[in-house]
Amino acid sequence: MNKPSLSICIPSSGNDTRSIKRQLSLINLLLSHANGNGTQEVEAIITFNCRPNCQLQKIAEAFTGLVHFNNKDLGFDANVLKCINLARGEYIHLLSDNDYLCAEHFAKIINITSTIRKTKGQIENHPL
């Protein structure tokens, strides 16, 4: 499988399930649009800094990205690092679990990372 150009990383405390559900629903739509041609340009990862409960498990099952539950509370910093370490993309976009990612912002990020990826490939394949 090819390496995605972008990883959306969402470290979460798991406390605000309403915000998490709203955000992950939007990211599901954005992922299906960005990866619609059969490639995986974008991946999304959420790390919950808690064990799963019924509500979080339901939310996680509906998410098309990677979901990871920590066995214990790692603290904010370690949870962020865990999320980043799970990412496979060349670039990372870090979000909080209560940030709202609008479609226009997302489209710009995808366009920028795709352009950089294409340009970088041309430069590497055509030395000066």
Image (cartoon, grey):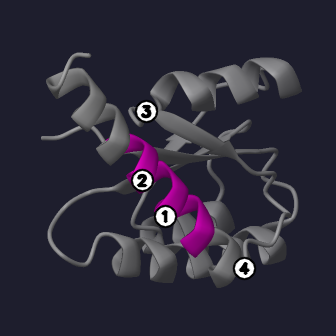
Q: Mark 3, residues whose alpha carbon is within 10 Å: few (<14), some, or many (≥20)?
A: some
Residue at the (83%, 21%) spot, across then down: 77
Residue type highlighted by circle 1: Asn
Count of numbered tags: 4
Q: Earlier in the sequence, mark 4 or mark 1?
A: 4
Residue type highlighted by circle 2: Thr
Q: CA distance from mark 2 to mark 3?
A: 13 Å
Residue 88 seen in render: yes
Relative to 43, is 71 above or below? above
- Give the residue pinned by disc 4: 102
- Do the numbered discs 4 and 2 sit on residues whose CB atoms are within 8 Å? no
The quadrant in which the N terminus is found is top left
Q: Foreground mark, 4 or 1? A: 1
Disc number for residue 111: 1
Q: CA distance from mark 3 to mark 4?
A: 22 Å
- Do the numbered discs 2 and 3 sit on residues whose CB atoms are within 8 Å? no
Task: Write the start and end of the magenta stretch as one range.
Answer: 107-117
Disc number for residue 90: 3
Which SS class for mark 1? helix
Residue at the (14%, 69%) spot, across then down: 38
Disc number for residue 43: none
Which SS class for mark 4? loop
Looking at the image, residue 41 sits to the left or right of residue 89; the answer is left
- Do the numbered discs 3 and 4 sit on residues whose CB atoms are within 8 Å? no
